[in-house]
Image: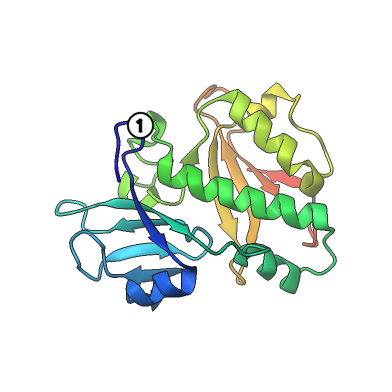
Amino acid sequence: MMSKLNPYKKLVFQNIENALSDLHAEDKGRYFICNCPECNQHEAFMYKNNKHFIQCNRENHCGSRMILEFHEKGDMSVYEQEIEKHYPDLTTEQRQALDWSNRVFSYAKNYFKSEALDNGYRDLSKQTTRGFVADLQDEAIVQHVFQKAEPLLNKDYSNNSWMCKRNLIFPLYGEDHTLDRVLLRSSIDENLDPKEIQLIFNPSKETRDFFIA
């Protein structure tokens, strides 16, 4: 059902396994290619780290976006299980913060519209960057992200205006598909120096806190 307040159609399944079966999902690594529930073409995609969202890739013919809901609720997200498997040394608080950050970044890439990205990102086109870069749009949202991610960063950047103005985010993932680090840039204040910062979001990695480019 769609409304003016929620333009996305809702699809309800018993569980994720039933959804993947009904949609004839085909594993493509970080995402599934599925039959689009609207146009029935095998051209809809669902990212593994955001199984509550599916979008048809036939933008000029369909392009439907749908929210998936499940009757059965798991005790732990698939992504958090992957984090626990690959990074057992992380604390429970750190695993939860990493899982939360990944879900928020995935949501932002899909739902947050940005005039700052209409012409692409740096020297990359809009078509190339779509689905990879998100615009958090407001300092208050960036501040909230830093508050939630503090267990991962071991520093509280939420009161640092120089950091909170960096609203453009480019999540970078490791070979195991877990969030590794995030590249940050600003469209709120384009005079910030340096232009970009890469901030480590996985404290189990042997690297510096952050480095600039």
Q: Residues within 10 Å of mark 1 (few under 14, many from 20)?
A: few
Q: Nearer the viewer, residue 161 or 55?
A: 55
The residue located at (39%, 35%) in the rendering is: 113
Residue 123 shows up from this direction: yes
Where in the figure is residue 199, as x and y percent of width and height? 69, 46
Q: Nearer the viewer, residue 32 or 127?
A: 32
Q: Nearer the viewer, residue 46 or 211?
A: 46
Residue 30 shows up from this direction: no
- Image: 119 above or below 100: above
Q: Is 30 left or right of 173, judged from the image as shown?
A: left
The residue located at (50%, 61%) in the rendering is: 71
Q: Nearer the viewer, residue 124 or 87?
A: 87
The residue located at (27%, 59%) in the rendering is: 57
Where in the figure is residue 15, as x and y percent of width and height? 49, 68
Amino acid type of the residue tagged 1 in the rendering: Leu
Q: Toward which corner of the image does residue 195 lie, by quadrant? A: top right
The residue located at (80%, 34%) in the rendering is: 156
Q: Is 116 left or right of 59, judged from the image as shown?
A: right
Q: Toward which corner of the image does residue 158 lie, by quadrant? A: top right
Where in the figure is residue 87, as x and y percent of width and height? 77, 68
- Image: 128 above or below 24: above
- Image: 191 above or below 1: above
Where in the figure is residue 159, as x and y percent of width and height? 76, 24
Looking at the figure, which quarter contains the C terminus?
top right
Give the labeled residue for mark 1: 5
